[in-house]
Image (spheres, helix red, strand yellow):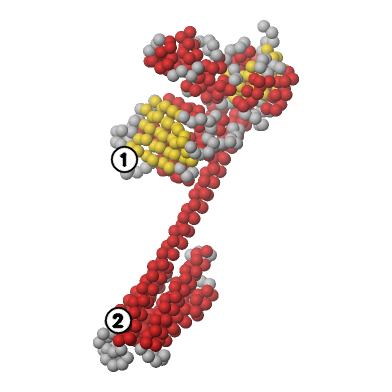
Amino acid sequence: MGTTRIAIVDDHALVRDGLARLLALEAGFSVVGSCGDGAGALKLLAACRPDVVLLDISLPDADGLDLVGEIRRRNPETRVLMLSMHSEPEYAAEAIARGACGLVGKAASAETLVDAIRRVAAGETLPSAERLSPREREVLALVAAGRSNDEVAQELGMKRKTVDGHCGRLMEKLEIHTRAALVAYGRRIAF
Amino acid sequence: MDRGAGFAERKAGVVRTILVRRLTLGVFSAVALVVLFTSRLSYKNPLFYSPVLWFLLTFPFKALIERLRTERALHWAHTGFYLAEGVLITVLVHFMGGSTWIGNIFYLFTVLYANYFLPRVYGALVTGWVVACYATLVLLEAGGTLPHRSLFALTGDPYQSLSYNVATILAGTVALYAVVAFTVRTFAAIDAKKNRMLAEREQALARMSKRLLGAQDEERRRIARGLHDGLIQSLAAIKLHLAPAKSKLGEEGYSEVAGIVDEAIRQTRTLAYSIRPPLLDDLGLVPSLDRLAESVGEENELAVRVESDLDGRLDREAEGLLYHVAREALENVVRHAKASRVAIRISSEGAWVRLSIEDDGIGIAPDGPRGLGLRGIEERVTIAGGTVSIASAPERGTIVTVEVPCGDDADRDRR
């Protein structure tokens, strides 16, 4: 596997610097650029075409979440991993709904950060769908297609209660707390 | 006592009562003229000149009152006017028909005005004076010192004249109803003005409260933002810079320091969250309520469900207000309701958003005391121009419903 080229967009210079140093120590990573605002981010990405961009949710001139769509359009090959100080899972759900591959906390341990970047670079969406059973994936796909639990039960020939149970476990495994977020996640990973 | 607006207002009130008097006495004087001509009384008769004198008296009084500078002088001048009025009415009553004449009812208006417009002591003084005037007249007439002219048992010219009697009764009736009408109108106008002023003041207060709450919200947002974008970021930066130094610090030293930084982050985040959850500005009301529901639910073993048919974001004030309401109501449920389930529902209808918080707890007594939480909700919602209703039955839970006006926020600012 080649080197993963990473760009960092965060308005806090010390955070940017800290991330760059941390990632420089990891084998297989190379930080190819960094900047502190939304306008700079688009220029930076156009210039260096990284594999992964670490994008802060709150930037001085733009909402990081709003920026995801723009980045995906201009740099479809670049995967966006959102950075945030906020730990609420709603942010991760929203990030995925907007087209990011996931969200990682800035205060996470170095291992978690590095692991998240590796997974995203490998094409995964966080939280990882790896741990889902085939049945759960089926349910998730139908939920993402906008079906109600009753309709899912009918299509898969299960009891309604079983579907409810699957949904509950899905939310638990994915750390997602609302149905809307579950739908967004399902659409994002699109089996 | 307020010397400024209050005094000017009081002075204007006194001038108004004197103008009303002048109008009434104008009617009086006109009637006296009719009597004068129909019964061919001498113009030297007090029946004619006393209303005219009284009418003229209002001019120097008005001029005097407008020059006064202190509350006390104003009260005394006003009192003086009523005292003079008492004497004049006594003279009129005597010459019109004696102490038994219906005209003695005019004393009533002097007492009424004096007690309405003047402080209690001055009002009592005028009342006592009026009683004394009338009692003196009665005693003098009864004792024979003054001739008593009863309207229907008069002897001698001109009191036997039919035209005199008819004119006198008409005069009494017309003047009486004129005074009644003016009095009622005066008091009604004063009342209306007071109500208008009260309503204006209330509106001004409401506007101010709204501004203050808005400013407070803004301040909280700024502080929470500052903690999140400043302090917590710096703490995160420390942690990031710490990782490459792991080899120097050793595994144990690293995790110790990292643990301290993590704790600082956790504390700051909790603080920022309690001031104003950033989620509210970043993602809006529904995700914030989801989060609130989950954290309150987990802490208190309560099943909290959030249902919403809201499409998109609301304006910032409405989101802040509704979040506040939900948080307070939920706190109330946790503290008092002994509930096991709570449903938070949000729906929008046109320019209105409805939020309801329903629990299956013990309920609250319909006329029982409201907790601070509910009163706080009522205050804030009312200030925002919304309505609150609380329905509850013993052992059947409580439902708090709030409706607030809300436009979609076009220029919402997530930062």
* Earlier residue among tags 2 and 1: 2
In the picture of the structure, the residue carrying the numbered disc 1 is B365
Quarter holding the C terminus of chain B? top right
What residue sits 43% from the left and 10% below the top? A156
> Neighbour class for label 2 at 10 Å: few (<14), some, many (≥20)?
some
Are the numbered discs 2 and 1 placed on the same chain, yes or no? yes
Q: Are marks 2 and 1 in contact (CB under 8 Å)?
A: no
Q: Amino acid at mark 1?
A: Ala
Query: Which callout, 2 or 1, points to the residue nearer the camera?
Result: 2
Q: Secondary structure at mark 2?
A: loop
Q: Which mark is residue B101?
A: 2
What residue sits 44% from the left and 64% below the top? B189
> Closer to the camera, A120 or B413?
B413
Residue B332: in sight, yes or no?
yes
Q: Chain letter of disc 1?
A: B
What residue sits 53% from the left and 72% below the top? B69
> Closer to the camera, A175 or A158?
A158
On screen, residue B134 versus residue B251, left or right, reads left
Query: Residue B228, percent across and down?
Result: 59, 31
On screen, residue A46 versus residue B83, left or right, reads right
Q: Amino acid at mark 2?
A: Trp
Query: Residue A135, percent across and down?
Result: 46, 9
